[in-house]
Amino acid sequence: MEMQAELGAHLATGLTNVARAWEVKRKDGMRLGFTDHDLDLAFVGLTFRADTGMTAMTLQQGTGLSVDNTEAMGALSDAAITEADIAAGRYDGAEVLAWLVNWKDVSQRQMLFRGTIGEIRRAGGAFHAELRGLGELLNRPVGRIFQKPCTAVLGDSACRFETDVPGYTYEGALVATDGARMLNFGPLGGFDQGWFQRGRAEVWTGPAKGLSGAIKRDLIAGDGARVIELWEPLRADLSVGDRVRIVAGCDKRFETCRLKFNNVLNFQGFPDIPEDDWLLTHPTQAKSQSGGSRR
């Protein structure tokens, strides 16, 4: 509040030295800072670079439950935001914070916007990123679904299963790959075929570092090699020698939760819900339909 008050006093003078600054926090933990000032600025433990050509459109804000939104524009460069990183999805859903700051005294600043990156368009060596405010989260449907399969995601706050325990993960180097979907780990003992099906593969090294994908198939080839196939190709190249971590899969069934994960207490489905046959009644074929005794 003191920083905002000082900035307000500075703005009240009528002769201002203000600039805009943006911080981008990617899901892989990387933080990037940008500013439309002609010199770099530094605060909150981050340097906001001035040589990226980053600009922003007018921020639309409203009261109530309306969603604040704006758009950021900038040049694609190897030193800042690259086209390869955008294509790989590294900025999908990244958190964005925007400040109005006195560039002569960066302690005088006010946060103008906080949200996430939405749709990104790129063309002609530049990008346009849609910025969505926190109110966007209120557009998500919230509620409980009554169904037999579990509605939780393995390892999330509802499931509570620790996937890092021995027997449920494997990390190793690829001995062969098609560069996008097929992961070959060579012979891999200790895991039944299909153990990682419906699980997750996380790339730890190489150009695709930080990316992950859902596992479609987990097979043991004729030579004993463990071959993992992803549902969708990763948006960056995989190479032999890249280290990949795979996590066991869950098919959401009550039996799997009990036998494979021993996690029945956190099962989020309804295994005893009646089937359609129990919910439908059929007309009787008895000759007498008066409602009385059939005798």
Image (cartoon, grey):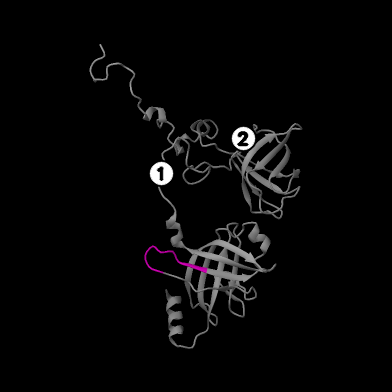
Could you say which is closer to the camera, residue 69 or residue 44? 69
Residue farthest toward the front in the current orientation of the protein? 287
Q: Amino acid at mark 1?
A: Arg
Residue visible at 48% across and 69% down in the picture: 113
Q: Residue 89: horizontal and vertical position, in percent?
A: 62, 57
Could you say which is closer to the camera, residue 147 or residue 249? 147
Q: How many residues crowd mark 2 within 10 Å: few (<14), some (14–19), many (20+)?
A: many
Mark 2 vs 1, N-terminal side: 1
Q: How many residues crowd mark 1 within 10 Å: few (<14), some (14–19), many (20+)?
A: few
Residue visible at 70% across and 52% down in the picture: 205
Say if 5 sits above or below 205 in the image: below
Q: Residue 36: horizontal and vertical position, in percent?
A: 58, 77
Secondary structure type for disc 2? loop
Labelled disc at residue 144:
1
**Quadrant of the rendering where the N terminus is positioned:** bottom left
Q: Which residues are magenta?
A: 62-70
Q: Is residue 64 magenta?
A: yes
Labelled disc at residue 195:
2
Say if 42 sits above or below 67 in the image: below
Q: Residue 266: horizontal and vertical position, in percent?
A: 46, 38
Residue farthest toward the top in the current orientation of the protein? 295
Q: Is residue 55 magenta?
A: no
Which quadrant would residue 50 be assigned to in this image? Answer: bottom right
**Quadrant of the rendering where the C terminus is positioned:** top left
> What main secondary structure does the magenta stretch of the protein show?
loop
Q: Amino acid at mark 2?
A: Trp
Foreground disc of the pair 2, 1? 1
Secondary structure type for disc 1? loop
